[in-house]
Amino acid sequence: MTDEKTLEMEAPPDADRGTEMAKDDGPDAGTTADYAYFEGRVVPFEEAKVHILTHTFNYGTGVFEGIRGYWDAERDEMYLVRLSDHVERLVTNCRILMMDPGHSVSDICEICKDVVRQNQFRQDVYVRPIVYCSALRVGPGMNEEQQLAVYNIAMGHYHDPSHAIDVMVSTWRRTDDNAIPARGKINGAYVNSSLAITEAKRAGFDDAIFLNQNGNVSEGSVMNLYIKRGDALITPPVTANILEGITRADVMTLARDEIGIDVVERSIDRTELYHADEVFFCGTGAKIVGVGSVDRRQIGEGGVGPVTAKLQKVYDDVVHGRNDRYRHWLSPVYKG
Ligand SMILES: Cc1ncc(COP(=O)(O)O)c(C=O)c1O
């Protein structure tokens, strides 16, 4: 990987750089790498292609993960954040679709690291493993034909963390656990997120907040959500049709242990968003991002709130290996 392929997600690359994908889609744009893991081996990226009949392409019948790696130039090392937790979630989620990932958690972790190594990434990276249904046939019923694929893209900010974003409560409700479970990180379920984010952007907002089928706050389009009211941080419970975010759990730990603020998991009403002192999103891709307004109602002073800013700093230190207490959250790629 060369520096040429560096990509801030807000600034899609020129058309003639690297292997291209989704060039003009704003924050979703990415530049891919030279190699991917596909059908049991690492192959040139252009060879990692699926047939038009592939079941997951037609029906969304896959499970995936998103893992970030942060490049540490001083140590000449790449650290993947919470690698085994992400892979364990992938393997556990396969149970929902009755899929067999075909590899152990430790094998998949090694494959993820190997793909980054082969690509010689020396910049922040996003690692995407997918377990997909590779059967070539029509009809949504699944069989045992499954494959693991892993690719990388260079990744900058999803939302610029130095600015608070303006969000709307989506008119789209979060998919219910008894319909398409949000905790499953199922490929096809992300149509729900696509509808919400696209609606929000076209209406002039930066992102969206989902309510669940009960009308309580669930999460963001691809991020979990916290509010601060009074002396505590509050986040919806895992039963609110959220993805059980790894960053959500990490924020909980860091808020309690590093900042000394209480965290409560409970249902959040829509209007509590408008009453909140602070609102922020968190997720692997988005990291921690402050919300300045919800439905055009200003939150706090309208910028990144003080507790949000503290958490951003603490989290940034942790993922960049500057806090030894959380070193075990990081997996080195090159020397590890
Ligand atoms: C719908 C949704 N919620 C929350 C998150 C945050 O999860 P994590 O912190 O595990 O990346 C994601 C991230 O991919 C997501 O897609």
Image: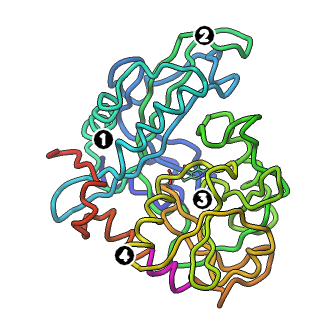
The magenta stretch spans residue 198: no
Asked if residue 212 lies left or right of residue 90, the reply is right
**Numbered circle sitting on residue 224:** 3
- Residue 23, how many percent across, how many down? 57, 49
Q: Colour scheme in the image?
A: rainbow
Q: Secondary structure at mark 4?
A: helix
Whether residues under marks 3 and 4 lie with C-beta atoms below 8 angstroms apart, the answer is no
How far, Cα to Cα, is label 3 from label 4? 20 Å
The residue segment tinted magenta is: 305-311
State the CA–CA distance, disc 4 to disc 1: 31 Å
Q: Helix or strand or loop: what does disc 2 sit on? A: loop
Does the beta carbon of the residue at mark 3 sit less than 8 Å from ligand 1?
Answer: yes
Q: CA distance from mark 2 to mark 4?
A: 47 Å
**Of helix, strand and loop, which one carries label 1?**
helix
Left/right of residue 212 with respect to residue 82 in the rendered view: right
Which badge, 2 or 3, is on the more N-terminal residue? 2
Q: Which residue sits at x=30%, y=32%?
A: 106
Q: Quadrant of residue 320?
A: bottom left
Q: Residues within 10 Å of mark 3 (few under 14, many from 20)?
A: many
In this orientation, which residue lies closer to the viewer: 43 or 113?
113
First of labels 3, 1 by sequence position: 1
